[in-house]
Amino acid sequence: MNLKHAVNNLYCKFFKQDFQGDSNTSYLYDVGSANWSNKGYSQFVSEAYKKNVVANRCISLVSRSAASVDWCLSKRGSAQLIAEHAMLDLLHHPNSMQGGAEFFEALYAYKLTSGNAYILAVRNSGGMVKELHLLRPDRVEVVPGKGNIPKIYIYIYSR
């Protein structure tokens, strides 16, 4: 019996009902080799995050806790904290639709569910960053450059 079947049997015994999934709906595979699902990010999030109360709770707690940490700013090499700065304002109010905690909670949730998180920095005419917006990870395509360093990121609006 492999690990996947053992977990499925445990599920059946614990919840006293048959496991409803087939081998294509489980994200747990045999130990020893990677076995990537052919499902997209949206379907994975729906099945493994939205419909799984344990995963949802874990991701929510981690994201909310990480987003609640206060930001501190200081000059490099100095222990003296800077109380007011444009960077702190941006982190507390990244855009007109989200506050800082909400923005970073969503950022960490993207990172935990997809493995990646992308931020679009909107600059004013002077080159200063004025807004931060989250990009859905499943819509970002990374084009590799030399040495596997990303050359460019492409955001695909409709999928």
Image (cartoon, rainbow, N blue to C red):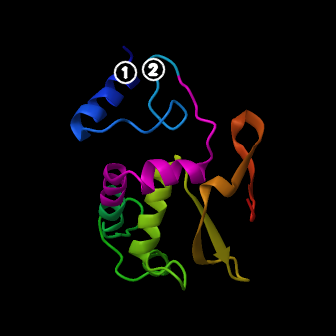
| Residue extent of the magenta highlight | 34-61
- The number of discs equals 2
Q: Main secondary structure of the magenta part?
A: helix
Q: Is residue 28 left or right of residue 144?
A: left
- Taking the view exactly as shown, the residue that stands out farthest to the left is 14
Circle nearer the N terminus (1, 2): 1
Q: Where in the figure is residue 33, as x and y percent of width and height?
A: 51, 19
- Residue 15 versus residue 126 in the image, above or below: above
Q: Where in the figure is residue 20, as x and y percent of width and height?
A: 42, 39
| Residue 78's disc number | none
Residue under label 1: 3
**SS for dot 2:** loop
Q: Are marks 1 and 2 in contact (CB under 8 Å)?
A: yes
Q: Is residue 68 magenta?
A: no
Q: Amino acid at mark 2?
A: Asp
Query: Counting other residues with Cα less than 10 Å from the Cα at mark 2, is it few (<14), some (14-19), or many (20 or more)?
Result: few
Please tell me which residue is depicted at 51% across the width and 77% down the height of the picture. 94
Mark 1 → mark 2, Cα distance in angstroms: 6 Å
**SS for dot 1:** helix
Q: Amino acid at mark 1?
A: Leu
Residue 74 position by quadrant: bottom left
Q: Is residue 44 magenta?
A: yes
Q: Is residue 44 left or right of residue 150?
A: left
Task: In this rendered view, identify the residue nearer to me: 92 or 138.
Answer: 138
Q: Is residue 121 left or right of residue 4?
A: right
- Taking the view exactly as shown, the residue that stands out farthest to the top is 1
Screen quadrant of the C terminus: bottom right
- Residue 119 versus residue 90 in the image, above or below: above
Please tell me which residue is depicted at 68% across the width and 57% down the height of the picture. 139
Residue under label 2: 30
Q: Where in the figure is residue 104, as x and y percent of width and height?
A: 44, 67
